Amino acid sequence: MLSRIQIYILKECLAGLAMVLGLLVLAILLIDVVEQLRTVGGDVSLSLLSALRLSLMKLPLLVEQTLPFALLAACMLAFMRLNRRSELSIIRASGLSAWRFLTPVILLAGGLGLFSALALNPFAARLTQSFEFERARLLQIGQETLAVADTGIWLRQGDDTSQFVIHARKVEDAGRTLLDVKMIEEQRLYVGRRPTNDFAFVRRIDAERATLNDGFWQIENLVENLPNQPPERRQSLAIPTSLDAVTLLDKFASPNTIGFWSLPGFIHETRSAGLDASRYTMRWYALTATPILYIAMSLIGSLACLRLQRLGGTSRLLATGVLAAVGLYFFTQFSASLGATGAAPPPVAAWSPPLFVLFASLAFIAYREDG
């Protein structure tokens, strides 16, 4: 389906992508290992191998985030080499238009975008979740977590001496009020004065409602169950907590830890539980727009290097291409923030920036090639 020249251009782009990705992976690993030694190693004893293991768990997510820029640099590198060896002049002299020799670049970018969204993202999300759990285990944190399941909301809070496991069928008021609540309190066991990793059951609370106030849960219409005692019905009870409304929502699962295939079901469960799912909806639409973003990035990199070197102005075009790519990135992030907060519809916020750059690039090619 591709001509020999198009296959040759595709190979040049793949070679450039392999080189750029290799350098990026090495740089990311080096920087992130140092970062893990500085952050995690500053609180606990962390060996170099453990830091490398944490960085390898985080690596797929970082590669996914930097892959558009790697593709941009690879296209720039490939066409600069073609230009330097005067092969681009020969290709143009043979009558091949920009539409023809940019086709393999577009196919490569679209295929890479699909691979990133459908395969790399779920793999990166799974490893990112493992990274966060492992980091929390090393730092001995994670007493306060929030999860959504088809049975409702599961929340855990606690400190070094006690923990609460909280389940609610539904939430209201952006997560501040829990309905149909069950709480189980456990106390840490000690051997002498040395704490252990075991906990003992203290009590169970079944309540109609629990409201998060400043520094405590206000529980209403509850039944308290203590070991070896009859259930006691009470009108209200206050339980101390270190959570606030903002922290409670921040404990929610990060969109980066949920893969492409799991996002639709997770969004449905989150909405059914009464929580705001805007961040996850925005993430899903952003992943669906990934192929368009990759094609836009590849066209920016290619168009910046199509001008023949003997005509001059190559450096200015390179700088313009880099600035356009950086502008697209910040425009995409800003638009994603609008979509995540509900200020703009998520499909519009996710698809507008890459489509705008894609159509602008195609218009530029049409102007240059067809007049």
Image (cartoon, grey):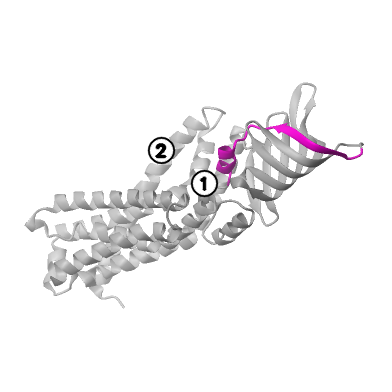
Across and down, in percent, residue 131 comes to: 55, 44
Q: Secondary structure beneath disc 2? A: helix
Q: Which residue appears at 18% of the width and 72% of the height?
A: 97
Across and down, in percent, residue 289 comes to: 41, 61
Across and down, in percent, residue 255 comes to: 52, 51
Q: Which residue is mark 1?
A: 57
* 152 and 162: which is toward the camera: 152
Question: What residue type is disc 1 on?
Answer: Met
Across and down, in percent, residue 73 comes to: 28, 53
Q: Which residue appears at 15% of the width and 66% of the height?
A: 368
Q: Is residue 182 above or below residue 83?
A: above
Q: In the figure, is residue 84 to the left or right of 103?
A: left
Q: Which residue appears at 30% of the width and 61% of the height?
A: 356
* Alpha carbon distance from label 1 to label 2: 14 Å
Question: What residue type is disc 2 on?
Answer: Ile
Q: Is residue 235 covered in magenta?
A: yes
Magenta range is 230-252
Q: Secondary structure beneath disc 1? A: helix
Q: Residues within 10 Å of mark 2 (few under 14, many from 20)?
A: few
